[in-house]
Image: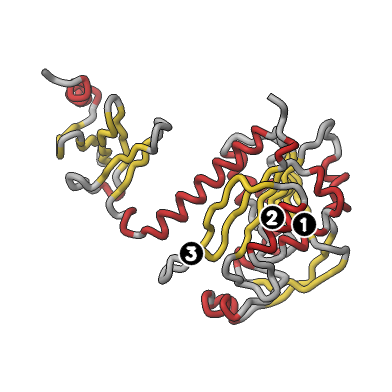
Amino acid sequence: MQTLYRRLLRLMPRIGVQVTDIAPGTALVSRSATPLSVTGAGKGTWIVRRNKGGATPEPGATSAVRLGETGAVLLMDAAAGQDERKLQLAAAEYLCTQHVAAMLALYEANCVFDVGANNGQYARRLRRLGYTGRIVSFEPTSETFAKLEKAAERDPDWHVYRCGLGREETTAEIHTGWKTMNSLLGPSDYGKDRYSRFHTSDTEEIRIRRLDEVMDEALDGLADPRPYLKMDTQGYDLEVFAGAGKRVEEFVGMQSEVAVLRLYEGSPGMGEAVATYEAAGFGITGMYPVTREATTGRVIEFDCVLMRADAAPTP
């Protein structure tokens, strides 16, 4: 007896779609010059994907992996599995962003402080994931801030500040020309060995403000502020955190890039950073590797997500 799956595939040519069986549970589907492949992912589930370059997939080249009892399915290309490190980091980035979005919703956060915003990648990702609250982004360097400002110009609830944040109000020289890794700190010996970009740099004088000094302005107009703090400042997160003073207690949660292997001279290690955050009342809800050594597999940095448990809304 024909399965429903096969009957559906046989109907596709009537709407201009060509179907060719290439393996049990797998078929090649094409329309015009763009092939699509259909992969059986289990009972009642099939996945259709566009094939790169119009290539016909080899039988068994694609597999579908069920993710536990969640109902989610991961479509795995054979080529993807060849670079374990890249696959793991991509998965970690995806899981981290999904987790942050879930925590923002659970804790009813309505203002995200995006410290070390770069071009606005983090804020744009939050919007794609459905976060509609206020975003306040901080980026100190002139060239990068111009890109950030442009990214935010059509979003009325995305505010941008051209400054860095730290322990005290001052000015400082920041290393530039390191792309997403510009820092107020110089590179460590380990950092120089890992990244050739650290061998040369320009500098730019920037303004440093305290977080507690900008909070009233950033939260203005919110009747019941429930802020979340994200920091990605290339070794400077604890200085930003210190600048919040007592007002750090107002944050329902936070996110910090913590270092296992230090890329910057004088930056805190993961143990010191996490201990500081936990002493301020935050508890870890997720740890996601950001970078790993290709030769050893060691994690260099984690994205650490922490929430203040007593700030969770009562069910």
Q: Is residue 234 above or below residue 42?
A: below
- The answer to whether marks 2 and 3 mark residues whose Cβ atoms lie closer than 8 Å is no
Q: Is residue 314 left or right of residue 54?
A: right
Distance between the Cα atoms at labels 2 and 3?
20 Å
- Which residue is painted at 79% across and 67% down in the image? 206
- Residue 250 image offset from top left, x and y in percent: 81, 43
- Residue 189 image offset from top left, x and y in percent: 59, 81
- Residue ranking furthest to the top: 1
Q: Amino acid at mark 2?
A: Met
Within the image, what quadrant is residue 33 found in? top left
Quadrant of the image for the N terminus?
Answer: top left
Q: Is residue 173 above or below residue 169?
A: below
The residue beneath circle 2 is 231
Distance between the Cα atoms at labels 2 and 1?
9 Å
The residue beneath circle 3 is 292
- Residue 298 image offset from top left, x and y in percent: 48, 66
Q: Amino acid at mark 1?
A: Phe
- Which residue is painted at 37% across and 41% down in the image? 74
- Residue ranking furthest to the left: 1
Q: Residue 225, can we see it?
A: yes
Secondary structure under the numbered disc 1 in the rendered image: helix
The residue beneath circle 1 is 241
- The answer to whether marks 2 and 1 mark residues whose Cβ atoms lie closer than 8 Å is yes
Distance between the Cα atoms at labels 1 and 3?
25 Å
Q: Is residue 141 left or right of residue 245?
A: left
